[in-house]
Amino acid sequence: MTRTSHDTRIHADEKVPTIEIVREFDAAPERVFRAHVDKDLYQRWIGPRSLTTRVLKWEARTGGEWAFANDRDGEEIAAFYGSFHEVRDSERIVWTFTYEGEPDSVALETLTFERLDGGRTRLRVLSVVKDFETRDGMLASGMETGVDEGYDKLDELLAKEA
């Protein structure tokens, strides 16, 4: 497994029910953005290494829908769905993110792709949820492992396709 020098920072605001994730990648914003909107690429990197992802629906455009399921050893263990509210080429994605097991706990997420020197990208994800209980439940669910391992897999994918 390849490890990079990039740390994923996850911050839960004390005053509002949000989670901010910040991660840098050694690839241009266009490439990092593409890995978020191309269903074949997305399912290759999203989530922890112990799971596989099946994209069930993917309309990566403003107004489109998405859905995917996570499997372990051929058994579905979690499913997620949402809507693409805004897809702005290589700059920004706004989507909802809902865990099927908690349909009343919808997160509104804004992803921004910031161009850095040297052909690099800083990805910022701001997730807003309805209350602190929902936010804290997300954090306690093992989300950090999925985010860290997923972004490590994305690093590997971007390096292969360089």
Image: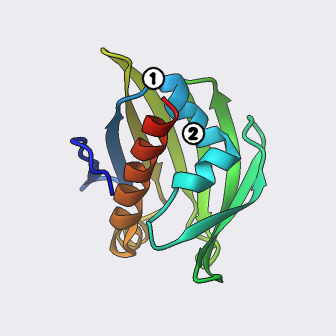
Tag 1 or tag 2, which sits nearer the N-term?
1
Q: Residues within 10 Å of mark 2 (few under 14, many from 20)?
A: many
Q: Nearer the viewer, residue 22 or 121?
A: 121
Task: Quadrant for the N terminus, please.
Answer: bottom left
Instruction: Tell me if I can see residue 24 in this picture.
Output: yes
Residue for badge 1? 28
Reading the image, the residue beneath label 2 is 35
The quadrant holding residue 134 is bottom left
Name the residue at 34% across, 70% down. 136
* Local SS, label 2: helix
Could you tell me which secondary element the residue under label 1 belongs to? loop
Residue at 38 percent across and 59 percent down: it is 149
Tally of marks: 2
Q: Is residue 146 above or below residue 2?
A: below
Residue shown at 35%/47% (left/top)?
21
Q: Is residue 17 visible?
A: no
Residue positioned 36% across, 53% down in the render: 19
Residues at circles 2 and 1 in contact by the CB criterion of under 8 Å: no
Image x and y of residue 58, in percent: 75, 50
Count neighbours of disc 1 (C-alpha within 10 A) and say few if under 14, some if 14 to 19, many if 20 or more.
many
Residue 41 horizontal side relative to residue 31, left or right: right
Q: Amino acid at mark 2?
A: Ala
Name the amino acid type tagged 1.
Answer: Ala
> Which quadrant holds residue 145?
bottom left
